[in-house]
Structure formats: structure tokens, C-alpha cells
Image (spheres, rainbow, N blue to C red):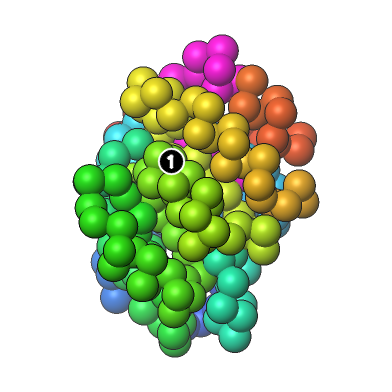
Amino acid sequence: MTDTCFSSLKLPASQLKNLNDLGYAQMTPIQQQSLPYVLAGKDVIAKAKTGSGKTAAFGIGLLEKLNVLSFACQALVLCPTRELASQVAEEIRRLARYQANVKVLTLCGGMPIGPQIGSLAHGAHIVVGTPGRIQDHLRKGTLVIDQVQTVVLDEADRMLDMGFYDAMLAILELTPPQRQTLLFSATYPEQIQEISGRFQNKPISVEVESVH
Ligand code: ADP
Ligand code: MG
């Protein structure tokens, strides 16, 4: 039987306390199945529905790898919409409460680009955003992703629906080949399988049927 306690994972006591303070008593099924691999640095392709706790399934992992003494962007999370990106950024900030000085920045379209450029100039360890706006910053040179250790494609099938296929490919091409790539999607159309085949290294597949 799989252990459902966060304490079964190799996490610092400060993060275990934080999770406890957040009221996360047990791992959700997707967290149980994916976190051991995520923390081991493996690529994961995960099928799970909304509300299953996907953000912590990747957020806890990317936070463990972070070096806050470096100002480089070390984790990039791509989301289909501004609303989803904001929710993911908020959840990552909650998960990072025990770690000092972690900077999480959201970069989404439909927002003025000037303030985003200003924020990027101060450095961000984790960037969460929509593919179109991330590409705008990459073209301008205001965002550099050659030090990224973790790339997350969150709700990848919805990003396809939004027309972000080419943008996802172009962004992944600019990240280091040795990065960890975590792919979350409710469905697996051909283009998602293609992205996995091209950019993931021996991915572990996990699937959670229902939330309850
Ligand atoms: P998804 O991305 O799969 O839709 P979220 O990551 O947004 O799901 O999580 C859904 C909700 O569940 C959030 O409010 C989050 O704070 C909460 N949550 C996540 N993991 C746990 C857990 N282990 N225990 C209790 N609540 C959790
Ligand atoms: Mg989510």
C-alpha cells in the first residue's frame, strides 16, 4: 500500500510543517503517485482532472531544487490562461512560505508588458505564465530560460485548444536539454504525445481516475 503521508517523502521538516499548517494532512492520489518521481528528478506525464492537487504535485518538487542565491529563472510553469496561472502562482507562494526569498512571477497576456519587464529586471526564480506572453519576453530578451531546471506544462491539452502548440515547442527548445519536464493533462491527443516524445526523457506515466 502506498503511504499517503507527506512525511513519507524526503522533505525538510520546515516544509512538512508548512504543509501541515496549510491543512494538507494527506497526499491526494495524484500527489501520492507523482511526488516520489518528481522529487527523484524524473520526467512525469500525469493524467489527472481539475481539483486533484496537481499544483503541489509539481510545486513541492520544483521548490526543493531551487537555489535562491542565484537570480536565474530556474522553473518555468506554462498554463493555458491568466486565471490558471494566477492560481498556480498563489499556490506555489503558499508552498514556498517556509523558504526565504523565493520570487514567483506571473507573466500573462492581457496585462501591460512594461511592469512585467520591470519585475523581470529584479530577477525571478519561478516564472508562471501563458505561452504567448512568455514568448514575447523571450523575443525581447527580457526573460532568459537557459538556466531552467524544471519545466511544467500544466493543463497541456487546454494549451493546445488555445493554439499554443507552436509556442510550447519554441519555448521548450530554448530550455536546457537536461531539464526535468513535467506534463499534466486531462487528455492525451497526438500533439501532446509528440511533445512528450520530443522533450521528455523516459517519462513515468501516472494516472488518477477520479478525485475521490
Ligand atoms: P488542480 O490543479 O489539480 O486543479 P490544485 O492544485 O489547484 O488542483 O488544488 C486544488 C485545491 O486542493 C487547492 O485549493 C489546494 O490548496 C488543495 N490541496 C492540494 N493538495 C492538497 C492536500 N494534500 N490536502 C488538502 N488540500 C489540498
Ligand atoms: Mg491546476
- Does 73 lie within the magenta span? no
Which amino acid does the dot numbered 1 rest on? Pro
Front residue of 111 and 160: 111
Front residue of 75 and 113: 113
Q: Position of residue 167 (x, y in %)?
A: 50, 34
Q: Give the magenta range.
A: 180-193
Crowding at mark 1 (Cα within 10 Å: few <14, some 14-19, many 20+): many
Q: In the figure, is residue 205 to the left or right of 154? A: right
Is residue 16 something one can see in this rendering?
no
Q: Position of residue 153 (x, y in %)?
A: 49, 40
Give the vertical position of 181 relative to 16 (above or below): above
Q: On the rendered image, what quadrant is the N terminus found in?
A: top right
Residue of label 1 = 131
Q: Residue furthest front?
A: 140
Give the vertical position of 71 relative to 65 (above or below): below
Please name the residue shown 76% across and 47% down the image: 177
Q: On the rendered image, what quadrant is the C terminus found in?
A: top left
Please name the residue shown 56% across and 78% down the image: 71
